[in-house]
Amino acid sequence: MPQLNPTPWFYTMLATWLTLSLIIQPKLLSFTSTNLPSHKAPAPTKTTPWTWPWT
Amino acid sequence: MNLSFFDQFMSPHLMGIPLTLLSLLLPTLLLPAPNNRWVTNRLSTLQLWLLNTITKQLMTPLNKKAHKWALILTSLMTMLLAINLLGLLPYTFTPTTQLSMNMALAFPLWLATLLTGLRNQPSISIGHLLPEGTPTPLIPALILIETTSLLIRPLALGVRLTANLTAGHLLIQLISTAVMALLPIMPVMSTLTAMILFLLTILEIAVAMIQAYVFVLLLTLYLQENI
């Protein structure tokens, strides 16, 4: 199995981490989100029933 | 020279120049360039939606301290997704079939989660080695079993991704070889095999996405225990 040849292992590791940290992370950081994922504001829920106005 | 079926997994070289770095950099071209505009084009908007969905999906079960890991986990997911899916195109080299790349990703990240837990909350992290409600006579055996299972996690993480993708690519190559070999002899069998190949390709697309997700999901699970 050619994957088990240990010669390129160090360079593959280096290339992977360099790509991940120097290229992909800055690209993803530069995405300006229109709606940031945020925690839901803990608002108390309505417990008393109310009738829908039909008119 | 005659190629064997495993030669698709050899690290790519062109006249002696190693192309490994190129094979890792090219999938990043799918991500759009940074833009200062609030509303960008369709591709950027779709990718932003995908990114936010992935981030929310990964970060929901984690506590607030763990949200610091959002960037590295999301970028890992993006990279694995892009590399896996691009590898399904014919004649492309998939870096995630290389055990070296997957171990290089799995081992440091798993170690980071482990050391985070051991450093900040050592008792709780070590306490995970004994499940609740264990009968007392079983405790020594179970601690050994849980320690082994803990130490084997990075290996499992790396080998899972490697094996799934390697097996998929190998199957695709074998069945396409069968289709081409049967074409002059039994065209009907060749057509049936081609239909199997089509279904297999759909499966491989699903596997590519699922394996990328599982890799990152397991890392968030290991993080959950330790942070």
Image: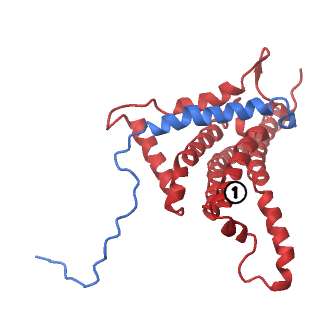
Q: Residue furthest left?
A: A55
Is B159 left or right of B44, judged from the image as shown? Answer: right
Instruction: Please state the horizontal and vertical placement of residue B58, each as a whole percent of the image.
Output: 54, 56
- Choose top left, top right, bottom left or bottom right for residue B102: top right
Q: Position of residue B6 (x, y in %)?
A: 84, 35
Q: Is residue B191 visible?
A: no
Residue at left 56%, top 31%?
Answer: A23
Chain shown in red:
B
Q: For mark 1, does the 10 Å Cα neighbourhood hold few (<14), some (14 to 19), or many (20 or more) residues?
A: many
Q: Nearer the viewer, residue A51 or B22?
A: B22
Q: Going 63% across and 50% down the picture, which residue do you hit?
A: B206
Assign the N terminus of chain B to one quadrant of the image.
Answer: top right
Camera-side residue of B103 and B138: B138
Q: How many marks?
A: 1
Instruction: Please indicate whether residue B89 sits to the left or right of residue A4 in the image.
Output: left
Tell me, by letter, which chain the rendering colours blue. Answer: A
Q: Looking at the image, which is closer to me, B145 or B46?
A: B145
Q: Please state which of residues A50 and B3 is positioned toward the viewer in this rendering.
A: A50
Q: Is residue B147 above or below residue B74?
A: below
Up-down: is B81 above or below B118? above
The residue marked by circle 1 belongs to what chain? Answer: B
Determine the image quadrant of residue B125: bottom right
Residue at the disc numbered 1 = B114
